[in-house]
Amino acid sequence: MAKTLEETTKMAAKAGKNGNKKLSALTGNEAVAHAMRQINPDVVAAYPITPATEIVQIFSSFVANGQVHTEYVAVESEHSAMSATIGACAAGARAMTATSSQGLALMWEMLYIAAGLRLPIVMPVTNRALSAPINIHCDHSDTMGARDAGWIQLFSENSQEAYDNTIQAIRICEHPDILLPAMVTYDGFIISHAMEVVRIEEDAEVKEFVGEYKPDIYLLNTDKPVTMGGLDFTDFYFEHRRGLADPVSKVKDVVLQVGAEFKKQFGREYGLFETYKLDDAEYAIVVLGSTAGTAKVTIDDLRDRGVKAGMVKIRMFRPFPYDEVAKALEGKKAVAVLDRSDGLAGRGGPVFGEVRNALCDWPNKPVTVGYVYGLGGRDIGPEMIESVYTDLQEIAKTGKALNLVKYLGVRE
Amino acid sequence: MAAKLTEIRWHGRGGQGAKTAALLFGDAALAEGKYIQAFPEYGPERTGAPVQSFNRISDRPITIHSQVKSPDVVVVLDPTLIGPVDVTAGLAPDGIIIVNTNQPASVLKEKMHLNGRRLFVIDASKIARETIGRDIPNTPMLGALVRVTGLLSYETVMDDTRKKIEEKFKNKPEVIEGNLKAIERAYNEIQSE
């Protein structure tokens, strides 16, 4: 599965030559490794895990070739990877890592510490199912499990978005109003290992866009000594956790501002979510990741047959854009939320819960149902997505759903 | 064929280069200004085990990210897969299947359920042994695919594949020339039923 060191080194050497503005045929992992090369972080500490391994494998060859000035720390586990990244970032460095699935799970306690210490760490995560049973393929259960850790989460539909989101996340996280960590996610194998056309921007332009990281408060600043990770009991813990909600509430504005600057510089548009043929849609789905691309094909097909189908593709899942999503879905006849993870909460997946929450107080709210699909990489094709729109048309007739939550594409 | 989305499925055995062939074809298509996808099916990867890889080629951006279920073209790198693996599964009614075999198309046709789909044969293993020195049939099958589909120009494929192979085998010029010769021969020797 993994490339040999020789191959990745050659790939790295080629990237150095061709690091100019052109279309390339790259996998998601290759595109993200290029984003990291152009970001040129001070420290990367990482541990390999399928299907994220290639990101840091390719990146380590950039380090070996002197194409970046990064201090690369080979650690013995993901827990150590996140710990070292936190240490480096607290010291004042721009620090990154990357992981997936069980690796993210092993980082668990450190994820909360990264956010609690207000460290702007950017971490690409290739979405992969959690064990058991053991599976290496895509679903979103890994990052969904980390949704309340205080990290920003940006989901990507394809390799281009994974590349663009990685670059934008640096600006979002390091914004003085934010100083929070972010996961940039993309679907394992479906995107991480599929070669497609990606525009890699010029090194100098990306460098200028991300700028230099100049932290105000950091441990190696001997002129302004601080303590990080101190003890808080009943006296101040609550105030500090309450304080964490303030930067979270500002993320939305900064994401939009950085998205606007990115569009001005590179031409591609990013918001909190993308809508597809939604304005006059009667039936809408809410979806994350690569399935959104497949859904576009279904929607075009349905539109050709006179069905007013549309879509909301969530980009920023954390913090969740409640009001904006509710406004976008207001007045639709019926809405389906597609979750690529099972929240096991007893009523649908985590995205379903958020969308229902968003719509709860909205006067003109549509009937909203949930689907759990694609666990462990189970394929979802246009026909399966079409079956959801067929359900929605039935639901719209009565205004009532027989099943609030369904499993899509599973053998029962 | 070029105006719409074309889907290709490669069947091979682990080690025959089905993934590399899909990547080379995808890269060459990009060099011609097309939008592409190239991806393998990831499962238990053992030398000799049946594997698949896929291409999508289009003049417009490709957003679909599901598996390829109804390909327009099937390329079979190893004839012993016919039978154990349903290589024509989902193949479009007017689809094309290209098989690496030393048997004539008429004989092979008897064994397959083609239902009007067109069969092309080429002894890619023989070409590979004679040009590369080993039975790695992926590059000759690439040549056969280019000829049969007409999706890409022969010159683009030769130029782009040379660049790709040169990166990989800088110190083995005989491998580079062997692979290019293999593409050229298969391009010229492909037989229809």
Image (tube, coloured by chain):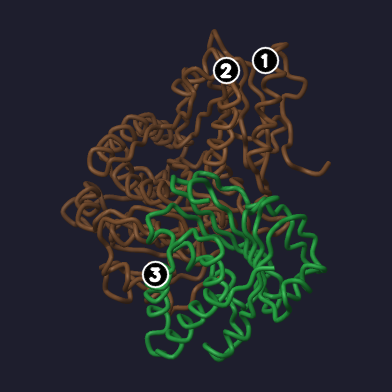
Q: Which residue is mark 2?
A: A282
Separation of marks 3 and 1 at Cα, in angstroms: 55 Å
| Picture residue at 62% right of the left edge, 86% below the top | B126
- Specify the label residue A274 is tagged with: none
Q: Which residue is mark 1?
A: A396
| Picture residue at 48% right of the left edge, 46% below the top | B3
Q: Is residue A217 above or below residue B123?
A: above
Residue placed most toward the observer, B111 or A274: B111
- Specify the label residue B155 is tagged with: 3
What is the display colour for chain B? green
Q: Is residue B131 above or below residue A57?
A: below
- Amino acid at pointer 2: Glu
Residue placed most toward the observer, A157 or A87: A157
Q: Are marks 2 and 1 on the same chain?
A: yes
Separation of marks 3 and 2 at Cα, in angstroms: 49 Å
Mark 3 residue crowding within 10 angstroms, few (<14) / some (14–19) / many (20+): few
The answer to whether the residues at label 2 and label 1 have Cβ atoms under 8 Å apart is yes
**Image location (x, y in percent) of residue B127:** 58, 84
Mark 2 residue crowding within 10 angstroms, few (<14) / some (14–19) / many (20+): many
**Image location (x, y in percent) of residue A176:** 25, 39
Q: Are marks 3 and 1 on the same chain?
A: no
Q: Which secondary structure, mark 2? A: loop
What is the display colour for chain A? brown
Q: As drawn, is A406 to the left or to the right of A268? A: right
